[in-house]
Amino acid sequence: MTLEAGQQLLHYRLIQKIGEGGMGVVWKAEDTKLRRRVALKILPQLMAADPDRRARFEREARAVAALNHPNIVTLYSVEESDGVHFITMELVEGQSLAQLLPRGGFPLNRLLQIAIPLADAVSRAHRAGITHRDLKPDNVMIDTEGRLRVLDFGLAKLQEPTESTEAAHLPTVTAMTGEGKIVGTAAYMSPEQAEGKPVDHRSDIFSLGTMLYEMATGKRPFQGGTSMSTIGAILKNEPPSVTEIDPALPRDAGRILRRCLAKDPDRRYQTALDLRNELEELKSEIAAGVHAAEQAATVPTTRRLTTQLAIGVGTVSLIAIAGLVATQLRDRGNPSPANYDSRPITASSAMDDDPSWSHDGKFISFNRSATGSSDIYVTAVDGGQSVVRAQGDGDQVCARWSPDDRLLAYVSTDQPGTPIFLIPPDGGTPRELISTDLPALDYRVQYIMGDRPWSGDRKTLLIAKATETAQVAIHRVDIAARRVEQITFPPPNEDDYSPSYSFDGKRIAFLRSTQSGTALMEVPAAGGDAEILQQAVNSFAWRPDNRRIVFETGAQLFEIDLPTRTIDQLTSGRGDSWNPSVSAEDRLVYVAGPNHDQFLYIVDVETGERVQLTSYSMENGGARFSPDGQTIAYASDRTGDHEIWLHHLGGQRETRFTEHPERDGNPEWSPDGERLVFLSSRQGDVEKLFVANADGGGGARLLVDQPINVGRGGASVFDPVARWSPDGGSIAYRTGGEEGSELWTVGSDGLNSRKRLDGVTGFDWYRDNRRALATRRRGSETELLAVDLESGREEILFTGGLQEIDVAPDGHAVAFCYGRGHMSMGLAVLRLEAPSTSDGLPRAIGEPETVVQAEGTWHVHNGGWSPDSKRLVYTHDRDYGDIYELVKRELPL
């Protein structure tokens, strides 16, 4: 029978077909009794009619049901309805390992995060007498919480004593189509499996080795143009060592994979448990720095641009900044990383960030984002359970210890004003100290305090606080009197963050964000002029000798000696390192690991159904539907350069729209779909608007010679910075002015630019060239306004935590990111009543309706509406990282 969405099988309503293989079709379904989403694996009727095949299908169900492991999919029941045989199982929503695999392979620490639980899951199946026989990246899922699941035991072979050798027949190669071109299974077979010989659990170990090889290098060890040539390579060829492909990998990684891929099963690991133990040992050795000497010392590259780099820079070209730093380092002599060991302090699938030492050196505080928001944790440095100390609906960040370790100061976005609270580190009731007046969703919240904001006498606290003009400056707070003194005065369109006392309390270092980058600055604690210490710094921490500062740039850690301005490199390699903190004993902790991955989704606003568009790792965002709804333009840095890509919804291959070494991003379509305006740094350090034909012809031309205001005055760096008017005649954009952010318009020919609005953090046209919706700061909250650009009339539609607005083409709704904190930010829609006259303004209907809610370790960023005003494209942003200690190795005499 033909199955369709909406059809009922018993009490299961079919929603969407999500997979198909040799042993069945998989549907997403709703269990109408228990009101939960499940996966149904349905046996094709032709196979169900065969008693042997049906028995094999039911044996799969028994095999999976017998397993109880957090990394193996959970089976619920075996069912039959009107001749349709199916099993119900846990629905795992996320991405397959095949979708997540970067072109060049995973960084080693991320590879091990996946490989260890994968080997452990297979080991559990083997101990139950089950051989999977179809291990491949398509059968491994990483869910939205970051947890791995092994799927599809459809080729599992139970090792029962009565089973004949015929049961070990050659597995079906479902991957062959047409002239035999491989699309999957055959590439992961063991030699004995490819020859049709009996197989046991050691065949799975070969398949695991094939997967690990591909995870490490981005290449399969055995390749061919057809299934037979691939099988021939498996039987005869020896692949190059992974260390030949990537010399940065430790030699032990090559040894482990060579043993997995041995042709003779007797020469492989004899159990998956042995393989898991070897991988765990390798992970421990890497954390301890055992393999550090094998890695070549290199100047940091810009291939992996982290969220911290992006939000710390704000308006500047990220690649240009990293290039600037590399140039400075070359001018001073290439620094070589010292011989350091690293050991993990935390290990989770969440985002552990922003560590801070207690003054006695026994504990650290940090932020953990694991439940849709960021919470404050405290952990003993030398081992112990991490304990939550502050949590709420919004983000709790930036925890800093008082000099006597009796209080933690931290920032909360739970309520308007984004206040600073004080709480005992062993628990208690938090006490509000003072508001910072920063919006809850503002990325700068996590930079309100630097590594050492408390004065030595515990009487004052340094914070970044918004001024009356919405600039951010460094202030000193008298804790007892709650008096505030502004101590830095940044120039217009510049902001100051992350203030930190030196250990002797005589100097204050901080970060200043400008149109051309983020600089490390210093000012005397007693007062005086600020001085630039180092360009392109995103986070930093003083050393106890008061002459050295550890800083992060290009996602690696360096150290500058201030009297001589010499620089030493502390970390290197494929992993990122950021947010250092230094103790009074000169111990250094930092955040390590890949920072975040972004995936594009489309959501149906009415039904809530979501479809994933891309599975590329790294940064992929700023997506915009074309006027005909057939193409989505977005920015991605997955190739190493930040470029604009076109995703074609008709199924064609994606095309690269821009290809330039400088940063291109924030695309916006013209109403006729023939041109794109986008942001680029290709003319220097600041970003400006360029226009190009959508068909790629004619090249890009500068639209207007003004710096564009991205992330200034409380705006989101993900907000579209340019909006084409409905008639296509002009383009609105944001830039900096004397009083903060300004909205300007310019003709689509680049002429007749003029200022239209002050203090705008976001903007979109409403139906015509006269009316618009805009966002503007109101204290620490954001106002959503309807504006008549001709008369200047404004109406407030909503006030709260929102950003990244986009108006539906039919004018009946506006979508935006909504929440009490950046890490808990979801996607919401506010319904609008359209005006009946050409000069009327829309009004809001009710409160915002959440369409996509942040969950676990991910939150969202908005893209925009489809032309029919029914769907939204948006970014699913997942963050992860762990805290490590960096320890200088004692060299032998």
Image (spheres, rainbow, N blue to C red):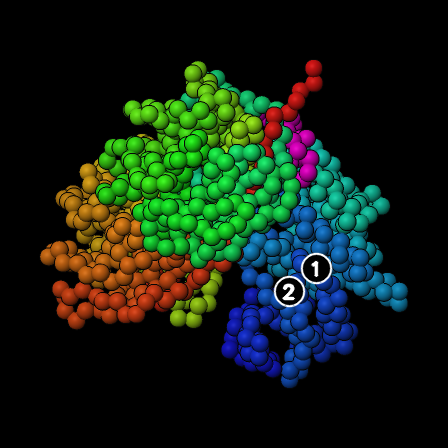
Mark 1 → mark 2, Cα distance in angstroms: 24 Å
SS assignment at label 2: strand
Upstream in sequence: badge 1 or badge 2 = 2
Tag 2: residue type?
Gly
Residue 483: quarter of image: top left
Q: Is residue 412 above or below residue 537?
A: below
Q: Which residue is mark 1?
A: 69
Looking at the rendering, the stretch of residues picked out in magenta corresponds to 283-304
Front residue of 857/523: it is: 523
SS assignment at label 1: loop
Residue 337, how many percent across, how many down? Answer: 56, 24
Front residue of 645/129: it is: 129
Q: Is residue 113 magenta?
A: no
Give me the disc on residue 21: 2
Q: Is residue 8 visible?
A: yes
Tag 1: residue type?
His
Give the side of residue 417 with respect to residue 620, left or right: left
